[in-house]
Amino acid sequence: MSDASEPSGPPPPIKTPCIKVCVVDGESGLCMGCYRQLSEVAGWARLSDEERAAIMAELPSRRSRIRPEKLAMFG
């Protein structure tokens, strides 16, 4: 008989916008791969699902804070 307090497997993976391009733009302070701030990257695992979802919803609009010529090097 299984103990109900035992985990049934590994926890589900945490959703992340990370694309493994970890270069921080000095002007905006945003990662040029995912558009998060360093503090958001560092604390990502400690945020709630709701906090992560709110940040992820905001990321597309942050792209405009990085000069286009800088982003051009990433395709």
Image: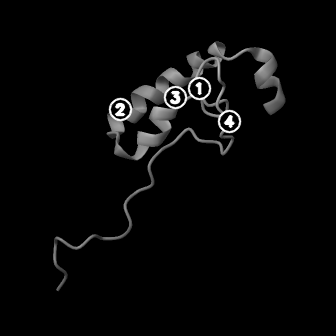
- Circles 3 and 1, Cβ within 8 Å, touching? The answer is yes
Q: In this figure, which residue is indicated by the disc labeled 2?
A: 51
Coordinates of residue 75 in the picture (x, y in percent):
82, 30
Check the image and name the residue furthest to the front.
26
Type of residue at label 1?
Answer: Leu
Tell me if residue 39 comes above or below residue 12 in the rendering.
Answer: above
Q: Residues within 10 Å of mark 1 (few under 14, many from 20)?
A: many
Query: Of the residues under marks 4 and 3, which one precedes in the sequence?
Result: 4
**Label 3 – label 1 distance at C-alpha:** 5 Å
Q: In this figure, which residue is indicated by the disc labeled 4?
A: 23
Query: Of the residues under marks 4 and 1, which one precedes in the sequence?
Result: 4
Q: Secondary structure at mark 1?
A: loop
* Numbered tag placed on residue 2 in the rendering: none
Query: Of the residues under marks 2 and 3, which one precedes in the sequence?
Result: 3
Residue ID at (46%, 41%) = 42
Query: Of the residues under marks 1 and 2, which one precedes in the sequence?
Result: 1
Q: In this figure, which residue is indicated by the disc labeled 1?
A: 30
Task: Name the residue nearer the viewer: 2 or 75.
Answer: 75
Query: Of the residues under marks 2 and 4, which one precedes in the sequence?
Result: 4
Single out the mark in the foreground, 1 or 2. 1
